Image (cartoon, rainbow, N blue to C red):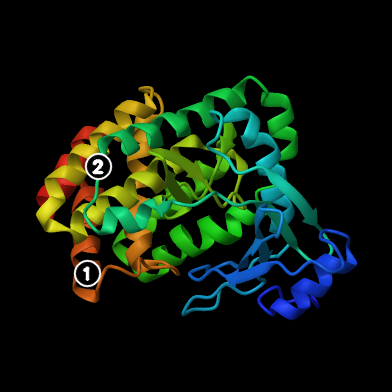
Amino acid sequence: MTTTPRLDIERHDELLRYLRDRGRIGLEEQPLMRTLEGGVSNRTVLVQRQDGDAWVLKQALPKLRVAVDWYCSPERSEREALALHWLVRLAPAGMITPLVFVDRELHLLAMEAVPQPHENWKTMLLSGRLDPAHVQQFGELLRAIHHNALTHRDGVARDFADRSFFEALRLEPYYEYAATRVPEATAFLTRLVEETRARQETLVHGDYSPKNVLVRDGRLVLLDHEVAHFGDPGFDVGFSLAHLLSKAHHLPHVRADFGSAAHLYWQAYGGEAELEPRAVRHTLGCLLARVAGRSPLEYLDQTERTQQQRAVLTLVTRPPRTVRELVDRFVEAL
């Protein structure tokens, strides 16, 4: 397994010395540095330079910060840098942060920081602040990534052919691990893994969730691209829908609003009939994985996790045919 790099960017004196030695900043420059909390898979530090520029530095961890053992090669930082290179061209202007530099040896990258003021979309949603305009953008952005990548299919397929990070960060800890914890869903999840591995259609983000979205001046900015790969777009749809529906579960006073948001999201994405059954299966898989996988949603307590697992198992026995049916039946089952 790859060893931890010598540099630890959360030690700000080490980071300052590194930036000066590599010529990234002036030898006398004294930038402000602040460690950003909440990262599971990376060390993350905001660097505010004296000339007004601001960077976010990310250093990939070989062992993720979760309760159970979960490992992934820190070389995935190179994948995120490659994804930034592509996404800034595929996504609408201003919705992807530009890459500043990447250091392959130390498994870190720097990107331009999103200017203040901004808010994390997940934080907004958990406080009940659900704006349909943001949901509309969320769906349209994912559609742009999936569809625009098709116009560069050969290049995208070549650059993102490796799926080892998707296996280590999604298929194993989400679907395969949950299959060992929930015997009633083992057959369903095993088939879903096999189906997902067989699909190679377009650029898939792999971590498309409100947690990785900042809202600035009413516009969404997408972050965290280290799981990007050439694969099944249905995974992105299911992964993101599961987040909206889990919040519908957690916030009963706005449950109907989140159900409507899930409908709007699918409509804004413009999913085609061929994709819809897979989107349904991935949504069910992710709803289950986020309560029984290696990385359960922290805002769901044990009672809510048990309820969500029960609701999903009910749906798995008679799978919905459409996203609309899935959303309505899940909300009704809570």
Please, is residue 71 above or below residue 230 in the view?
below
Label of residue 306 in the image: 1
Which class describes the residues within 10 Å of circle 2: few (<14), some (14-19), or many (20+)? Answer: some
Q: How many marks?
A: 2
Instruction: Name the secondary structure under disc 2.
Output: loop
**Tag 2 or tag 1, which sits nearer the N-term?**
1
Which quadrant would the N terminus be assigned to in this image? bottom right
Please, is residue 308 above or below residue 152 in the view?
below
- Expressed as whole percent of the image width and height from the top left, the position of residue 122 reads 36, 55
Which quadrant would the C terminus be assigned to in this image? bottom left
The disc labelled 1 sits on which kind of residue? Thr
Label of residue 66 in the image: none
**42 sits left or right of 2 in the view:** left
In this view, the residue in front, 309 or 188, is 309
Outermost residue on the top side: it is 151
Residue at image coords 44%, 40%: 220
In this view, the residue in front, 55 or 141, is 55
**4 sits left or right of 249 in the view:** right
In this view, the residue in front, 283 or 270, is 270
Task: Give the CA separation, mark 1 to mark 2.
Answer: 19 Å
Which class describes the residues within 10 Å of circle 1: few (<14), some (14-19), or many (20+)? Answer: some
Label of residue 319 in the image: 2
Residue 19 appears in view: yes
> Which numbered mark, 1 or 2, is in the foreground of this view?
1
